[in-house]
Amino acid sequence: MPHDKRTTNIIVRLTPKEKSLIEKKAAAAAMTLSDYIRHCVERRTYSTPIPEINRLTYHQLAKVGLSLSHAIDTIEAAKISEQNLSSFEEVRRTTVDTLQVVRSVQSQLLGLKSSEELS
């Protein structure tokens, strides 16, 4: 595949320290400075800042999730010890479903993609 000749420049002002750092990173990657900068720019993605309310909600949901996990563990322990479980299975199912919803909401609040969801 033929490459177009690069004839356009972009001027970026850096401090000598910034330039030195970028040059060292390019050398460590065995790349030219131009290739390294191009590589970083082309592959870098920026996420939008997460609103503080999302962070707070995330942490509250984490507490709910922890409580739900504990409830599931308690139900599982009761099941293993063969306690009367006539209504436990429905409670367990509901608790597991609720925990999955909490984790999904947490992931959405942090802007995670479905493949990155918390488990």
Image: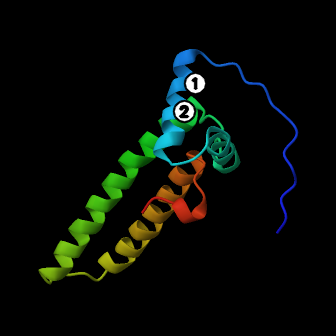
Under circle 2, the secondary element is: helix
Counting from the top left corner in percent of width and height, residue 38 is at: 69, 44
Q: Amino acid at mark 2?
A: Glu
Q: Coloring scheme of the render?
A: rainbow
Which of the two residues, 48 or 36, is positioned nearer the viewer here? 36
> In which quadrant is the C terminus drawn?
bottom left
Residue 43, above or below 73: above
Q: Residues within 10 Å of mark 2 (few under 14, many from 20)?
A: some
Would you say the residues marked 1 and 2 are in contact, meaning their CB atoms lie under 8 Å apart? yes
Residue at image point 66% right, 38% down = 48
Q: Circle 1 is placed at which residue position?
A: 19
Residue 47 left/right relative to 106: right
To which quarter of the image does residue 76 belong? bottom left
Residue 68, above or below 83: above
Q: Is residue 83 visible?
A: no
Residue 89 left/right relative to 105: left
Residue 16, above or below 114: above
Q: Circle 2 is placed at which residue position?
A: 23
Counting from the top left corner in percent of width and height, residue 21 is at: 50, 28
Residue at image point 59% right, 15% down = 15
Separation of residues labelled 1 and 2 (CA atoms): 6 Å
